[in-house]
Image (tube, coloured by chain):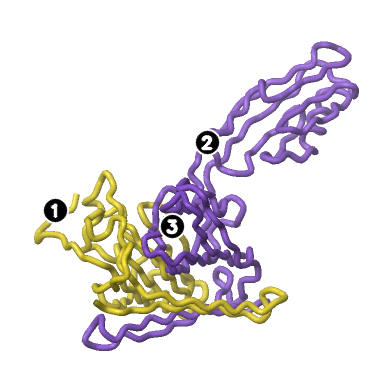
Chain colours: A yellow, B purple
């Protein structure tokens, strides 16, 4: 059983009258248990040169037992140093938010199955705002991975 | 300009053969600039007592397509308890006991109901017209009455338009707001022929990217959260 911790600090001395100094840390555990998450996609570093949306984790099976209702965590960071360049993050066609240059997210991911499962509608999609090249990092730490069979036809 | 920093540290000595240990820091800025986010809801807590969906933030209350950031933390210690975080119609994921998340939020607007009220007949200053809990004293004539309706402030609607019209636009995207003449109450003290017509021009939809939470339990369950926005 692996022990993985995710810690966050948010600080500001001038956002509000009182200094903001938030610190939290948790050990990543399987859903409803104290067993640690033990699988990961590894950290991807990618240079994207198109504004077309991509699936970040296309090999993982949507709605599989490994995902639905489980504890899965995703990190995405826009490594661009240009403040105007952003990545649009969508899940299931819903616009979740924009990561501008230097922004990161850390979020849970359910990847529930949709009526068009093979279309990966529960996937996390990332669309760069420019096609001149942007660096990104991402990883998924999860509690079980179900992979697509070889040569699966994607509808 | 406020300077707010968020730092994530991920560490594991035994998930992989090599140590996992990295830290990333982001200075939270407004969209496309180096100017820091300067608005926050403050750190807050929501204690739920039912496993039904709660609305934490309405997208229509915030500017769409900016660099808003949401922080969540499940304050419970029982490992089976979780909150499901939902953006619009998509369940993003679950935050179990002591889990936290930091996600961007576009606050995408939904489709707001729009209806046009047209004032007709004969109106005097002794008449009134009530809508959405607000009673407006009429003006002398149709145009003056429409002007008075446009000038009033309504809990759930904004008003605009010109001439004899008053265009009502819902403040939030909802599917349950239907406007027809029955929602208006005319008190006609004089002429007896004060009239209105109401026509819906846009049907509202419950399709905004609101932030919802759903507890896994009907027992008391607390989520800590904060929105940083611009």
Q: Earlier in the sequence, mark 3 or mark 2?
A: 3
Q: Is residue A14 left or right of residue B107?
A: right
Q: Chain of mark 3?
A: B
Q: CA distance from mark 1 to mark 3?
A: 35 Å
- Secondary structure state at the residue bearing disc 2: loop
Q: CA distance from mark 1 to mark 2?
A: 38 Å
The residue indicated by pointer 3 is B83
Q: Name the residue located 57 percent from the left edge and 51 percent from the top edge.
A: B58
Quadrant housing residue B156: top right
* Numbered disc in front, either 1 or 2: 2
Q: Name the residue located 39 percent from the left edge and 57 percent from the top edge.
A: B92
User: Mark 1 touching mark 2, by CB under 8 A?
Assistant: no
Q: Position of residue A21 (x, y in %)?
A: 59, 79
Q: Name the residue located 51 percent from the left edge and 50 percent from the top edge.
A: B49
The residue indicated by pointer 2 is B175
* Numbered disc in front, either 3 or 2: 3
The quarter of the picture where the C terminus of chain B appears is: bottom right
Quadrant housing residue A132: bottom left
Q: Is residue A82 left or right of residue B29?
A: left
Query: Farthest top residue?
Result: B192
Label 1 neighbour load within 10 Å: few <14, some 14-19, many 20+ = few
User: Mark 3 touching mark 2, by CB under 8 A?
Assistant: no
Identify which residue, A27 or A146, lies in the foreground. Answer: A27
The quarter of the picture where the N terminus of chain B appears is: bottom right
- Secondary structure state at the residue bearing disc 1: loop
Identify which residue, B22 or A6, lies in the foreground. Answer: A6
Label 2 neighbour load within 10 Å: few <14, some 14-19, many 20+ = some
User: Mark 1 touching mark 3, by CB under 8 A?
Assistant: no
* Residues at discs 1 and 2 both on one chain: no
């Amino acid at each position: 059983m692996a022990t993985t911790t995710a810690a966050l600090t948010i600080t500001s001395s001038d956002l509000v009258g009182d200094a903001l100094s938030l610190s939290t840390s948790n050990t990543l555990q399987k859903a409803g248990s104290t067993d640690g998450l033990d699988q990961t996609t590894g950290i991807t570093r990618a240079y994207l040169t198109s504004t077309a949306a991509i699936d970040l984790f296309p090999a993982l099976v949507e709605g599989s037992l490994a995902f639905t209702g489980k504890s899965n965590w995703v990190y995405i960071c826009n490594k661009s140093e240009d403040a105007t360049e952003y990545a649009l993050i969508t899940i299931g066609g819903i616009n979740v938010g924009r990561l501008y240059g230097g922004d990161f997210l850390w979020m849970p991911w359910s990847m529930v199955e949709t009526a068009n499962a093979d279309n990966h509608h529960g996937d996390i999609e990332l669309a760069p705002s420019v096609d001149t090249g942007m660096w990104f990092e991402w990883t998924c730490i999860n509690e079980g991975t179900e992979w697509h069979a070889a040569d699966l036809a994607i509808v | 300009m406020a300077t707010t920093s968020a730092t994530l540290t991920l560490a594991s000595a035994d998930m992989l053969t090599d140590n996992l240990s990295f830290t990333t820091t982001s200075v939270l800025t407004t969209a496309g600039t180096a100017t820091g986010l300067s608005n926050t809801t403050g750190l807050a807590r929501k204690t739920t007592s039912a496993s039904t969906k709660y609305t934490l933030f309405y997208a229509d209350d915030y500017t769409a397509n900016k660099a808003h950031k949401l922080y969540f933390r499940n304050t419970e210690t029982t490992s089976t308890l979780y909150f499901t975080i939902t953006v619009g119609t998509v369940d993003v994921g679950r935050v179990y006991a002591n889990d936290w998340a930091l996600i961007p939020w576009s606050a995408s607007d939904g489709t707001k109901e729009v209806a046009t009220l047209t004032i007709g007949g004969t109106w005097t200053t002794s008449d009134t017209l009530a809508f959405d809990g607000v009673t407006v004293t009429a003006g002398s004539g149709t145009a003056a009455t429409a002007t008075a309706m446009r000038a009033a402030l309504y809990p759930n609607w904004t008003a605009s338009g010109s001439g004899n019209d008053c265009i009502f636009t819902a403040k939030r995207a909802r599917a349950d707001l239907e406007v027809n003449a029955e929602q208006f109450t005319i008190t006609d003290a004089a002429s007896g022929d004060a009239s209105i017509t109401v026509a819906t021009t846009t049907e509202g939809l419950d399709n905004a990217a609101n932030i919802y939470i759903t507890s896994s339990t009907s027992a008391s369950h607390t989520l800590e959260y904060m929105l940083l926005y611009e």
